[in-house]
Image (cartoon, rainbow, N blue to C red):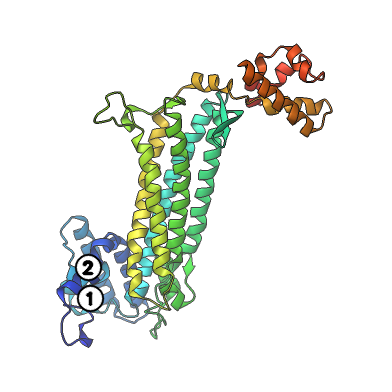
């Protein structure tokens, strides 16, 4: 039986019931919905809006329902549309008229907005915990490789010698900024919409601040129409997820390249690689490739919710029921990716010898040679031209800059002295 049946002269079509229902998606909010109802019932009793005895009866029954759900004893029903009406129906079946009083002074509009904010607060905590673990893993690895020299790249061309620690530190900084973004998102999530009603509040003498404090919110949404009609907090969360996935994807792209025979800087652990069904020699970096691919999935969730919200007039519209699939999926995907990526990093083999040998190729000390001449008093542009000609000469001679004799150096400029070899030592340049 529909809880809103009074206005209607006949039941809804079965297909419409299935189409309208969201219980398959939003049932994961059952804990948050019960938490919200517990706080709301307590406030109703304290304010004398319903008898305190009935508020206590509601509290005990809600706790019993929560336990039954946890124990797998509750089967949710499509006929009751969503998690809110499923739980309210169970409550009414168990305690009768007292259960019907729970929805006094609230709407599903402010109820679901509050549930979602509670859920998102938890998700932010989980994501930040996973980011912390990844950052700590990267910092530990960087400490171990302070003196591991490798090529640094621009345009995917060897540019200048760096250390692996510097490389890992770059991604560490990105993930730290991601942590900060989630912290900022939490500030705007941590406000309670409950008490906004459908859009215009309520005439009952409710205490919104009490409920907000009871639920662990730092404050309330001040404008009741805004509180129930926007999902910018969810869009921001998915945006933070998308940004973090972008950083993971970039890192995965590096690891996929480094894992190739052409680079051979690392080797993925067998536990995080797969083979080929036809080529026996293959060892594929599938985990890293999947994270790279799942980034598109999170981007899709962001665009989905942005598109859902883009044309909605105030206040609540049924379109907003579609907010939960992208929100849930983005958070789930990011958590899975962060968790497994940390394990990939922990277990991969780093081929330091190969990295250091690669530094000798590609004229990565050319900038240092130019800087050497600058320090001797030549304008940088003149130095740039001289070193460019030297590189061209070395390509023709099939040698590196540090293979040149002092005479060869001085053929290009008399300013070169024997200390040039120390100035262009790639290892000293990287570990500076």
Residues at marks 1 and 2, CA–CA distance in whole angstroms: 9 Å
Q: State the quadrant of the N terminus.
A: bottom left
Lower position in the chain sequence, tag 1 or tag 2: 2
- Residue 243 on image: x %, y %: 48, 51
Q: State the quadrant of the C terminus.
A: top right
Name the secondary structure under disc 1: helix
Asked if residue 206 shows in the view, the reply is: yes
* Relative to 17, residue 269 above or below: above
Within-10-Å neighbours for mark 1: few <14, some 14–19, many 20+: many
The structure residue drawn at horizontal position 18% and vertical position 68%, both measured from the top left corner, is 78
Q: Nearer the viewer, residue 10 or 176?
A: 10
* Relative to 138, residue 32 above or below: below
The structure residue drawn at horizontal position 65% and vertical position 14%, both measured from the top left corner, is 403
Residue sticking out furthest to the front: 396
Residue sticking out furthest to the right: 377
Q: Please state if 49 lies on the left or on the right of 129 as rendered.
A: left
| Residue at which label 2 appears | 61
- Residue 146 on image: x %, y %: 57, 26
* Relative to 48, residue 304 above or below: above
Q: Nearer the viewer, residue 1 or 203?
A: 1
* Relative to 17, residue 121 above or below: above
C-beta proximity under 8 Å, tags 1 and 2: yes
| Residue at which label 1 appears | 99
In the rendered image, which quarter is residue 405 located in? Answer: top right
């Amino acid at each position: 039986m529909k809880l809103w049946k009074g206005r209607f002269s006949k039941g809804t079509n079965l297909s419409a019931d299935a189409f309208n229902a969201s219980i398959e998606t939003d049932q994961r909010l059952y804990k948050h919905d019960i938490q919200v109802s517990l706080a709301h019932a307590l406030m109703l009793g304290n304010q004398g809006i319903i008898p305190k005895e009935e508020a206590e009866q509601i509290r005990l029954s809600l706790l019993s329902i929560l336990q039954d759900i946890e124990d797998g004893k509750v089967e949710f029903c499509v006929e009751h549309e969503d998690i809110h009406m499923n739980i309210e129906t169970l409550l009414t079946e168990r305690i009768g008229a007292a259960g019907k009083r729970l929805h006094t002074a609230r709407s599903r509009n402010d109820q679901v907005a509050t549930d979602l904010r509670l859920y998102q607060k938890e998700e932010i905590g989980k994501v930040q915990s996973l980011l912390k673990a990844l950052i700590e893993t990267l910092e530990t690895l960087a400490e171990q490789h302070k003196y591991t020299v490798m090529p640094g790249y621009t345009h995917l061309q060897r540019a200048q010698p760096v250390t692996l620690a510097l490389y890992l530190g770059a991604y560490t900084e990105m993930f730290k900024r991601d942590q900060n973004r989630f912290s900022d998102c939490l500030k705007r999530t941590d406000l309670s919409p409950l008490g906004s009603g459908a859009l215009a509040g309520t005439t009952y003498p409710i205490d919104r601040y009490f409920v907000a404090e009871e639920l662990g919110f730092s404050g309330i949404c001040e404008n009741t129409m805004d509180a129930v009609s926007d999902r910018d907090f969810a869009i921001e969360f998915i945006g933070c997820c998308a940004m973090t996935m972008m950083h993971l994807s970039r890192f995965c792209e590096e690891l996929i390249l480094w894992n190739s025979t052409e680079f051979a800087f690392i080797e993925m652990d067998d536990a995080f690689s797969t083979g080929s069904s036809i080529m026996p020699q293959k060892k594929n970096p599938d985990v890293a490739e999947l994270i790279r691919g799942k980034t598109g999935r999170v981007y899709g969730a962001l665009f989905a919710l942005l598109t859902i919200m883009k044309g909605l007039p105030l206040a609540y519209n049924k379109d907003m029921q579609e907010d939960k699939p992208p929100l849930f999926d983005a958070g789930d995907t990011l958590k899975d990716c962060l968790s497994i990526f940390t394990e990939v990093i922990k277990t991969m083999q780093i081929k330091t010898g190969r990295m250091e040998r690669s530094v000798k190729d590609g004229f990565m000390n050319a900038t240092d040679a130019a800087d050497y001449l600058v320090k001797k008093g030549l304008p940088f542009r003149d130095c740039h031209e001289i070193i460019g000609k030297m590189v061209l000469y070395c390509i023709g001679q099939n040698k590196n800059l540090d293979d040149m004799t002092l005479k060869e150096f001085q053929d290009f400029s008399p300013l070169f002295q024997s200390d040039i070899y120390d100035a262009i030592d790639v290892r000293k340049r990287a570990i500076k």
